[in-house]
Image (tube, rainbow, N blue to C red):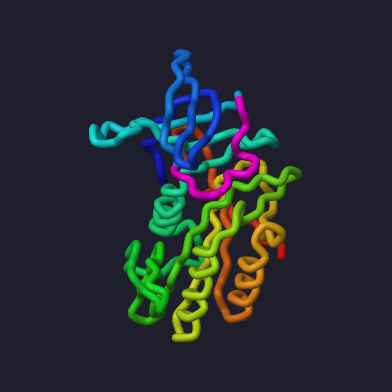
Amino acid sequence: MKKDLSLLPATFVKRYKRFFTDIRTEQGELLTVHCPNTGSMKNCQVENSRCWYSLSDNPKRKLPGTLEIVTTSFGNLAGVNTARPNHIVRQAIEDRLIPELRGYPSMRSEVRYGAEKSRIDLLLEDEDKGQCYIEVKNVTLDCGEGRAQFPDAVTSRGAKHLRELMAMVAEGHRAVLFFCVQLTGVETVSIAGHIDPLYAETLSAAMDAGVEVLVWQADLSDQTIRLQRPLPLVI
């Protein structure tokens, strides 16, 4: 469980060149921070909306600030730092929060695997159960009325990861696609086939092949980001 956050409030001004975001601090200063999100951030770029950022004490960083949480066009909060979900899910597994992923004494991160030279986000291992490959995806596309979708942009990388997971199932291992929903006000998650038809088709094939899908919503605040509850995936 992540307990040591200390996020600072600000006002969202604009995102540009994908990895840069201008915000206005509580003191009125215009500050450029790093935006660690390669997606479109659809519905997550609302001018003059509330946002939160973190500061790094690393003197080598060009931008000491990182955009962490934004307000969506539907008024919900979205965690846009895509570096966080892996840690959130790992901690939840260590805390035995997720029933389907209990009973594995070993867990490793960023392990090389697969014919397409990928790195699995989390690899669980047990002498009797074998290996469980877990690919974590961050969900922030707020569609209103309690609905969220993934992806928010075409993701050839995401389709590649699904192919790798299918290959692991074919070899006799468990494979799990884990949707970490860093978004408040959500009741269901579905796949945005209108945005990326290939991803939707590949996910359907992956599920038919035995790839498991887990969906969990995270609790977001300026002090804590942690997994809170499972959500249904609507196909």
Q: Is residue 127 left or right of residue 222?
A: left
Residue 233 percent location from the top left of the image: 66, 61
Q: How many marks?
A: 0
Give the residue drawn at x 60%, y 35%.
45
Question: Is residue 190 among what the camera can see?
Answer: no
Instruction: Name the residue at the right extreme.
Output: 145
> Furthest residue to the top?
27
Q: Is residue 155 visible?
A: yes
Main SS, magenta region, reads: loop
Residue 218 coordinates in the image, percent (x, y): 54, 47
Q: In the image, what residue occupies the spot 51% across and 75% down? A: 163
Residue 29: x %, y % from top left: 44, 16
Residue 181, above or below 118: above
Check the image and name the residue furthest to the left: 59
Kindly indicate the quadrant of the structure image that contains residue 49: top right
Highlighted magenta segment, given as a residue range: 36-47
Q: Nearer the viewer, residue 30 or 71?
A: 30
Q: Quadrant of the C terminus?
A: bottom right
